Image (tube, coloured by chain):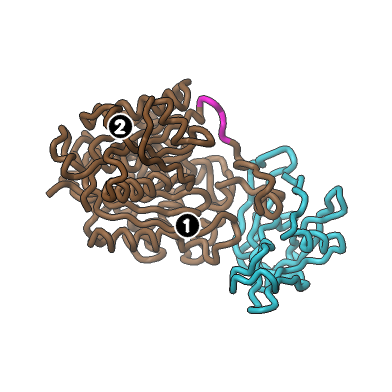
Chain colours: A cyan, B brown
Amino acid sequence: MSTVPEPDEATRTWWDATRDRRLVVQTCGSCGHAQHPPRTLCTGCGRTDALGHHDSAGTGLVDACTVVMRAPDAEHEAPYVVARIRLPEGVVLLSNVVTDDPQAVRIGDPVTVSWRPLDDGRALPIFRPAFTPQEK
Amino acid sequence: MTVAIVGAAECDLGSTGLSILGLQTQAITRALADAGLSLSDVDGIATTSVARFSATSLAEHLGIQPAWTDSTFAGGSAYEMFVARAAQAIEAGQCHTVVISFASNQRSAKSRSLGGVYEAHTPEAQFEQPYGPLYPASYYAMAAGQYLHKYTAAREDLAEVAVAAREWALLNPQAFRYDAGPLTVDDVLGAKPLSTPLTVADCCLVTDGGGAIVLTSLERARDLPKPPVLVLGYGESTTNASMTAVDDLTVTGAVASGAAAFARAGLTPADVDVAQLYDSFTITVLLSLEALGFCAPGEAGDLVRSRSLPLNTSGGGLSYCHPGQLGVLLLVEAVRQLRGECGDRQVAGAEVALAHGTGGILSTHATVLLGVDR
């Protein structure tokens, strides 16, 4: 559902950045490990006191994708693309690839971040193809 | 190993109109009758999906106060995990006779939803469910997409899994699709698309059903009416809760669970006469066959097409029964094959059976190897 729960202490920084339409990645200042979703410990080294957030370039590659043909609820209208987006910062996000031609989205396609506003000022990061259909 | 399965049974399957506890009671009393035991012999219970306190509620319903329980919630693989836990508890002397059971009335109760269960406090509610994935179907669909991309396997390789499952179901009077006639690759490809590349014919059934097995020490098992089925080995692996944690969707936790089970049993895939692999989706079977070592990566389609490995001989979740968690019914079918009770679908001379459970979104994996008493 598009109703997104309130952030908690682990995810507030990440969601607050979306108010400025910034996509950030949680990164450990001690070991350099990047992780998603944000947590209160680093899964790379176990430290709980060295986590920060860095801006993502906002680009990525489609790692896996599917076109949902039957929506699970009234908030979504099929068909639409659900995809794993691999960011160069080293994490994978689940998102939508928004395009006029859902069936044309392929693994390896380059995408760029875009935003779907939420009622409370936050925004959901979504992705659009980084090339025009002619280029493909 | 010194533990054996001595009883196995299904409850009513399909569309029953019965309650969860009513179906559980059917499965348990039938399995105990099969074992030649009674409820007063049972001092261990493992189950899920009865209530928040699943084993507790079931024990009270049965009127027993067990010395050992387990309600580990790991989706469809929990029942293979329970075999390991029960064997350990019996070997350690904490209890002597364990019933592992499951039942669901999800078809009658219309309790299944395409988007899965929503838990507002989970990371998935913040970071995944807003995008509208079907749970679990869209994750398996993405895994199927990666599989087809990585190996240039054919879409038909997925469909063949459903075709093969139907062939077995036509031999099993208990199967939901027993009277449905054969399925073709074109039928699967032409079925309604759900989450590409998967159609509804790549997805397991939604039915009521369940089953139970009874375990005790091998020493005691040899005095009971049915031939004991030995627990030869087991292993498990838990890999992910979210859709983004696993790096490569085509490599599952079955690699680790299978390797552990085979090592414990001192067996290899070549020793397995009949395999029951959780077929939540067609892709699940291809990934599990490769992960368990029955063939090389990318070659599972050819293996299924060859029909050289008797696989999901009940008809599986795709054509026999899928009550939300198939795990216990994989064990029931494995036991029956090793006892030679399977009638038209009996695999001649089966002495070693493998049951492999998969839960969640390729989240939990548990492998059990069973064998005849030689």
- State the residue at coordinates (76%, 54%): A7
Q: Which of B151/B141 is in front?
A: B141
Q: Residues within 10 Å of mark 1 (few under 14, many from 20)?
A: some
Q: Amino acid at mark 2?
A: Ala
Name the secondary structure under disc 1. strand
Chain for disc number 1: B
* Circle nearer the N terminus (2, 1): 2
- State the residue at coordinates (69%, 39%): A73
Q: Residue A130's spot in the image, x, y percent?
A: 75, 68
Answer with left or right where residue A15 lies relative to residue B279: right
Residue matched to label 2 = B9
Residue matched to label 1 = B238
Answer with left or right where residue A9 lies relative to residue A67: right
Q: Residue B211's spot in the image, x, y percent?
A: 36, 33
The answer to whether residue A75 is above or below residue B354 is: above
Answer with left or right where residue B142 lies relative to residue B223: right
Point out the stretch of residues depicted in magenta: B108-112
Q: Which of B162/B370 is in front?
A: B370
Q: Residue B49's spot in the image, x, y percent?
A: 49, 36
Q: Residues within 10 Å of mark 2 (few under 14, many from 20)?
A: many
Answer with left or right where residue B113 lies relative to residue A58: left
Chain for disc number 2: B
Principal SS element in the magenta part?
loop
Distance of label 2 from label 1 (alpha carbons): 28 Å
- State the residue at coordinates (23%, 47%): B3
The answer to whether residue B246 is above or below residue B181 is: below
- State the residue at coordinates (59%, 46%): B135
